Image: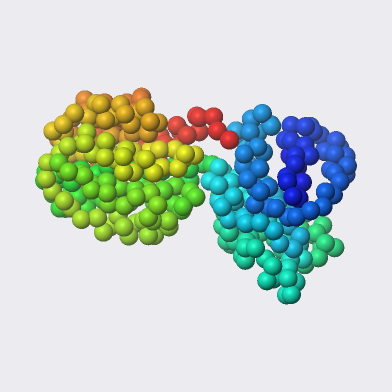
Amino acid sequence: MFINIYDDPTTEFNLKTHTNSRDLKAAIEKITQKGGLSNVGRALSFVNKNFFSDANGNRGGAANVAVVMVDGWPTDRVEESSRLARESGINIFFITIEGAAESEKQNVVEPNFVDKAVCRRNGFYSLNVPSWFGLQKVARPLAKRVCDTHRLACSKTCLNSADVGFVIDGSSSVGTGNFRTVLQFVANISKEFEVSDTDTRVGAVQYTYEQRLEFGFDQHRTKSDLLSAIKRVNYWSGGTSTGAAIRYALERLFEKSKPNKRKLMIVITDGRSYDDVRIPALAAHRKGVITYAIGITWAAQDELEVMASDPDKDHAFFVDEFDNLYTFVPQIIQNICTEFNAQPRN
């Protein structure tokens, strides 16, 4: 698909209009210059809403890439529209040509707009061309990057597209030492994800008879900050009201989940709940929260199966000892990814 950026973006052709390179080249040569302003932010919003739909030829298994060419500087803001596009799994490449002259920099609407627009600020997603005469030289390097699917970090994968909420049993039967083991298990799972504000986000609730929000989805935007926060969680001690904890997590964690994020809840408990888990678990399932139930020692198998999403065998786990929790990490991550890859998506 090709979009012309000027005052208002327009579609020149979409992903399924041309099926061979000859027709595509001819269509590109027929495009006429519109003139007007460089409303890149508006164009990115247009791309996010219209570009990669199934109706316009999107293929669910292919990476979504938008190459934005800007002469000088955008005449509107790009940060918010590009963030929303990245969260939708669109890999944005920016080619800036010539840039703003020294005397024009005061007119730039959003300084450092390239860094605000791209997924990673490491130079992979941006190319600067000093003049139009050098534009052809970047074609091959750009094509190589676009084809490097392993480095297209904004593409939707099982590891960068979720809000993961841990619901952690802090009851008296767990004990201080075992609680630290549980936190290590939480950290080991969290390490597997790509953590940032636009990738996977992680939150945690600890519960006894009561519930406590340890941190929300929007608090830790790097993996190192998240792992440090997990280490700082203090053991509470008390009873076991798992049903109330699930309800609390839905209200305090998942109500703030982003619409385009998968919702994953991982409940960890070492005993039978003093309250009903069936109704809160059903509410979670109805809200689209994929629930994994991890039981240890005295946990009740029937409750694990009720809490877990279907099929139970993929979402409910039981281990005899806290020290063996780590053995579940690869299987849980594998199941998360298998489930993700089985779903249709953009």
How many badges with numbers are in the image? 0
Q: Is residue 157 left or right of residue 182?
A: right
Expressed as whole percent of the image width and height from the top left, the position of residue 338 reads: 46, 33
Q: Residue at x 75, y 41 (%)?
A: 10
Residue 131, located in which quarter of the rendered image? bottom right
Residue 211, located in which quarter of the rendered image? top left
Q: Residue at x 41, y 42 (%)?
A: 257
Residue at the farthest bottom position: 102
User: Does residue 161 show up?
Assistant: yes
What is the quadrant of the C terminus in the image? top right
What is the quadrant of the N terminus in the image? top right
Residue 244, located in which quarter of the rendered image? top left
Expressed as whole percent of the image width and height from the top left, the position of residue 279 reads: 25, 26
Task: Relative to 99, say whether 261 is above or below.
Answer: above
Task: Relative to 248, say whether 224 is above or below.
Answer: below
Expressed as whole percent of the image width and height from the top left, the position of residue 213 reads: 27, 49
Task: Relative to 13, say whether 222 is above or below.
Answer: below
Q: Residue at x 50, y 29 (%)?
A: 342
User: Does residue 185 show up?
Assistant: no
Report the front residue among 55 and 308. 55
Q: Is residue 118 left or right of residue 267?
A: right
Report the front residue among 23 and 34. 34
Task: Relative to 214, say whether 265 is above or below.
Answer: above
Expressed as whole percent of the image width and height from the top left, the position of residue 111 reads: 62, 66
Q: Residue at x 13, y 48 (%)?
A: 237
How is this picture coloured?
rainbow
Q: Is residue 95 left or right of residue 189?
A: right
